[in-house]
Amino acid sequence: NLDPIDPRFPMLNLVFCLIRKDHYIDFVVPQLHQLKIDFFGHADLILHESEMRRQTGAFAILADGDVYSRWMRELLAWIEQTDVAVISACIDKIALTRRYAHPFDPYDLAIRFCLERTRQFLAANNQSQRLTQVIFESRGKRHDRAAGLEFDQILKQANPLGHHLPDFSQFPLDPLFIPKRANLAGHQLCDLLARPLAKWSFNASSHRRPMQIIQPKLIAHKVFPQTGWRRPPRSQKSSYWPGNTRLNPPANSSHAPR
């Protein structure tokens, strides 16, 4: 939303986490459930980065320094051990409104940037003709409808921004809008990564420990309306994404909440 813009955090950071489904089922979900049970007694709790930071609600137990230290250590270990390719786009809302008289929707811009790099990653890892589900966090019928339309326009190579768009015809993508209450591990992983990446966009020394873990997984991070990328992305080739080295590898899953 560009009206109003929160001056304390005038950024929108969209994160795509590309994860193989076998790894998601075998490690990501069960390990997160176990972590929640160890600290909170059940796995139904949904991780909210803002509530964790403020230590409110169920996260009030993190006000205890020892508990907080153990929680962060184990949470970061889960992220570090997760085989995920991270694509991120950070939109500076203030700079966007200053530069453009009629700025595009920040969320739509971020989707475009992330999908472009997603296509590059899929191509580099021999995933042509394989269906990839892109699982967005639902934000209401009106927003989901608009985001779905933008998604379709990108796949059809509609180009209001005036720059080259990649051809998605060989890379079928299926957008799904799932509410936060579904308690998806992929949504929560994206939520945990978004703030450190946004802060890091404008202060390279910010969130040093989380970024030490995130950066090796980061294949692309766009800051807009600045030109180019925050840093040259590492190789698109992924050691944990075997591509055609397995017979009938499972389809892919990309979680992409706000």
Image: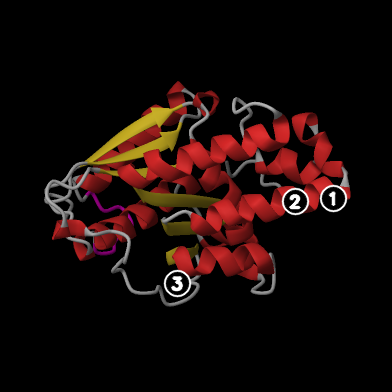
- Of the pair 210 and 54, the residue shown nearer to us: 210
Q: What element carries label 3?
A: loop
Q: Which amino acid does label 1 sit on?
A: Asp
Distance from the alpha carbon under mark 2 to that under mark 1: 6 Å
Quick check: 247 left or right of 64? left
For residue 66, the mark is: 1
Quick check: 48 left or right of 137? right
Quick check: 74 left or right of 80? right
For residue 70, the mark is: 2
Which residue appears at 31% of the width and 56% of the height? Answer: 118
Q: What residue type is labelled 3?
A: Trp
- Of the pair 7 and 242, the residue shown nearer to us: 242
Magenta stretch in the rendered image: 158-164
Q: Please name which of the two marks, 3 or 1, marks the residue nearer to the observer.
A: 1
Q: What element carries label 2?
A: helix
Looking at the figure, which quarter contains the N terminus? top right
Q: Residue 50: x and y, percent?
A: 71, 42
- Of the pair 121 and 243, the residue shown nearer to us: 243
In the depicted structure, whether residue 235 falls above or below residue 214: below
